[in-house]
Image (cartoon, rainbow, N blue to C red):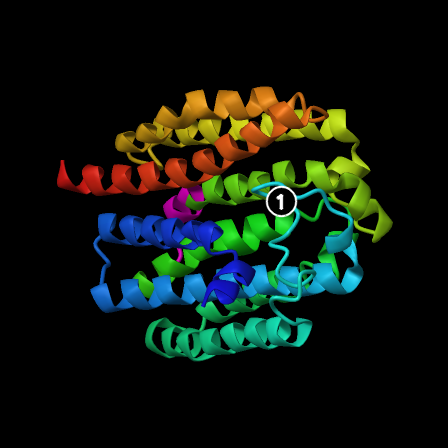
Amino acid sequence: MKKWLLVIRSPFLALAVVLAFLGNCIAWHFGAFNWGYALLTGFGLLLAHISVNVFNEYFDYKSGIDLETVKTPFSGGSGALPSGIVSPREALWLGLATLLVIVPIGIYFVVVQGWLLLPLLLVAAVCIVFYSPVILKWGWPEWAPGVGLGFLPVMGVYFAQSGEYTWPVAIAAVPSGILVHNLLLLNEFPDVEADKKTGRKTTPITMGGAAASKFYVATTVLVYVWIIGAVIAGQMPVFSLLALLTLPIAIKAIGGALKYDDPARLVPAMASNVLVVLITQFLLGIGYILARVF
């Protein structure tokens, strides 16, 4: 069991839980909620995240990047494949198996709630399967996890509950997309040299460290500006402003990101960034609950 928990990078699966929580909170706020659907969408998101993590482990090992990266608690891979704890074949089959289990869940919701869910699922699948072998070799690849593991999950969970897409929900899902985008962006800084050797074109490589760190700062600030603007425009409830409580943590992450060439500053910033990603979305979910209660 320990080796499987290692290769799926279990500590990082909290993101899937928070995304499912937020999407279901928004659905409940708007009067569309089913406990069975909530559990099933949460399970599906968990499997999707496991699939992403395992595919990343597999393709990183096959490309040789796992032997080049500097390991941190937040980047550089789990080390499960290079150490031989898990074989590449086992990792590949685990990634495929978890992806295949998602298929009947997706089909069920397409049948129950409508075919408009299908395009969303297909785009998310492309982001999952092609991220490591293909998308990472394009400029600005962080959009893929931002969309596939941020924006679309919130939208998909809401659709699974309600059978529709709405602009207020799309607006509410944007911070999740930006936050997950930034989760990948900041974690890429320690791997710049290794990524270059394998032909990857992450933003810290294509823009350079200084510009990429400023881009991270700008997009982090955008999360809070977006929430405030959406509340002012009446598109998100006032209680969504609870998410601003993570601003002091975000400031710590920003400070470390600007010192990207100093591991002693960057690694704590990466830790702060993880907290911002998880807690901000959790507080948004709580905000939607409170908005309906009060």
Q: Residue at x 53, y 44 (%)?
A: 180
Q: Position of residue 85 (x, y in %)?
A: 61, 66
Please state which of residues 15 and 116 is positioned toward the viewer in this rendering: 15
Please state which of residues 276 and 135 is positioned toward the viewer in this rendering: 276
Please state which of residues 75 and 43 is positioned toward the viewer in this rendering: 75
Please tell me how crowded label 1 is: few (under 14), some (14-19), or many (20+) other residues with Cα within 10 Å: some
Residue 166 seen anywhere in this rendered image of the structure = no
Q: Which residue is mark 1?
A: 75
| For residue 195, side relative to residue 76 (left or right) | right
Q: Quadrant of the C terminus?
A: top left
Query: What type of secondary structure mainly makes up the magenta span?
Result: helix
Q: Residue at x 49, y 38 (%)?
A: 274
Q: Is residue 292 above or below residue 163?
A: above
Q: Residue at x 58, y 51 (%)?
A: 145
* Residue 167 painted magenta: yes
Q: Quadrant of the N terminus?
A: bottom left
> Which amino acid type corresponds to the residue marked 1 in the rendered image?
Ser
* Residue 95 painted magenta: no
The part of the chain drawn in magenta is 165-172
Q: Position of residue 224 (x, y in %)?
A: 45, 27
| For residue 139, side relative to residue 268 (left or right) | right
Q: Position of residue 225 (x, y in %)?
A: 47, 26
Q: Position of residue 75 (x, y in %)?
A: 62, 44
Q: Is residue 52 above or below residue 113?
A: above
Q: Residue at x 43, y 20 (%)?
A: 248
At mark 1, the secondary structure is loop
Corner quadrant of residue 205? top right
| For residue 214, side relative to residue 65 (left or right) | left
Residue 73 seen anywhere in this rendered image of the structure = yes
Name of the residue lying farthest toward the left: 294
